Image (cartoon, grey):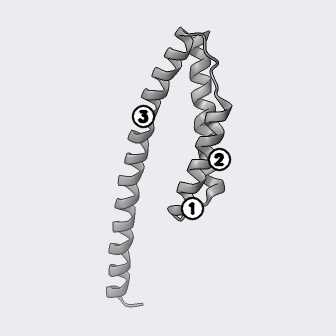
Amino acid sequence: MTEDVVARAAEVLKGHRESIDRLDAILVYTLGERFKHTQAVGKLKAEHDLPPSDPAREDAQIARLEELAKAADLDPEFAKKFLNFIIQEVIRHHRQHQG
């Protein structure tokens, strides 16, 4: 390979990495915003003595996310695992508010 080809590949790689870094920041801030809302839900549930989890809602959200994942060309199983992880963390927060 010539130096020119390597330099172009390095520039393309740099561009991809910059995009990944921006997307990682978006994910972190989006999760932060999501957890602000789930914290508010947890407080509301605690104030009204509601259970920390809602299995019907969780199932609906997982099904919804699987469909979104398919539309986004993302592995639906990965999306399901990711949402399950988030849901478990939310439930943990809700239990903290109750207890």
Q: Position of residue 84 (x, y in %)?
A: 64, 40
Looking at the image, which residue sits at the far bottom? 2
With respect to residue 38, does 47 lie above or below?
above
Asked if the residue under mark 2 is in contact with the one under mark 3, i.e. CB atoms within 8 Å, the reply is no
- In which quadrant will I find the N terminus? bottom left
Asked if the residue under mark 2 is in contact with the one under mark 1, i.e. CB atoms within 8 Å, the reply is no
The answer to whether 30 appears left or right of 97 in the picture is left
Label disc, if present, on residue 45 of the rendered structure = none
The answer to whether 75 appears left or right of 17 in the picture is right
**Type of amino acid at the residue the image marks with label 3:** Gly
- Residue in the picture at 63% in, 54% down: 78
| SS under mark 1 | helix
Find residue 2 and report its image quarter.
Answer: bottom left
- In which quadrant will I find the C terminus? top right
Find residue 53 and report its image quarter.
Answer: top right
- Residue in the picture at 42% in, 27% down: 36
Find residue 7 and report its image quarter.
Answer: bottom left
| SS under mark 2 | helix
Q: Position of residue 88 (x, y in %)?
A: 63, 32
Task: Using the numbered discs, state the Cα–Cα distance from disc 1 to disc 2 in whole angstroms.
Answer: 14 Å
- Name the residue tied to disc 1: 70
Task: Using the numbered discs, state the Cα–Cα distance from disc 3 to disc 1 in whole angstroms.
Answer: 24 Å
Of circles 1 and 2, the one toward us is: 1
Q: Position of residue 13 (x, y in %)?
A: 39, 70
- Name the residue tied to disc 2: 81
Of circles 3 and 1, the one toward us is: 1
**Type of amino acid at the residue the image marks with label 2:** Lys
- Residue in the picture at 58% in, 20% down: 94
- Name the residue tied to disc 3: 32
**Type of amino acid at the residue the image marks with label 1:** Lys
